[in-house]
Image: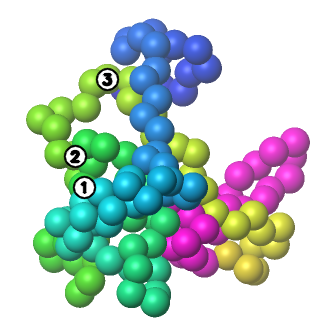
Amino acid sequence: CQLYFRDSCPRHGLPHFIHDSPAEGEREQGRGRRRERAAVIGVVGGGGGGVSRAVLSLPTGLGLREREGGAEGSVGVFCCHPSLPPGVIFGPYQGEILLHRKDCTVFSWAIKENGTYFYVDASDENSSNWMR
């Protein structure tokens, strides 16, 4: 419906928040399961041969795959369920906080707060989440 709302959408009701999967501080057992899942979807990143925090934070029910017609190695996030319920909200977008626009990358979002801007840059896969 494209409406902005604070508490409840007049058309879809209460929002349903979907949180990131834990990527840091997991028990050893959980890490193995996440690495297996990342390998199954064929996405490994973060330099040094490990799976990046961005990939590990992908919520259950979403998957990564190479995008058709995209640049080589370009991946997208796809729903593994038949459909998501109305009112689903993902986030927050995570990354490094920047104060100057000149420091931004293609992974930066501008946020206006109290009349001034700051930026969240998710170019580092190991300090950002899957929303990058």
Q: How far apart are marks 3 and 1 (CA)?
A: 19 Å
The stretch of residues the image draws in magenta is 105-131
Q: Residue at x 52, y 43 (%)?
A: 91
Above-or-below relation of 18 to 6: below
In the rendered view, tell whether residue 103 sits above or below residue 83.
below
Q: In which quarter of the image is the N terminus?
A: top left
> Residue 101 in magenta?
no
Q: Name the residue under label 1.
A: 63
The amino acid sitting under disc 1 is Gly
State the residue at coordinates (51%, 13%).
8
Residue at mark 3: 86
Task: For residue 19, say whether it is visible.
Answer: yes
Most foreground residue, 46 or 5: 46
Q: In this view, does 93 lie to the left or right of 111?
A: left
Q: Check if mark 1's residue and mark 2's residue have beta carbons within 8 Å.
A: yes
Disc nearer the start of the sequence (3/1): 1
Determine whether the residue tagged by mark 3 lies in a helix, strand or loop: loop
Viewer-nearest of labels 3 and 1?
1
The image position of residue 93, as x and y in percent, is 57, 52
Relative depth, front residue between 27 and 115: 27
The mark total stands at 3
The answer to whether one can see residue 76 in this image is no
| Kind of element beneath mark 2 | strand
Quadrant in the picture for residue 51: bottom left
Labels 3, 2: front one: 2
Q: Earlier in the sequence, mark 1 or mark 2?
A: 1
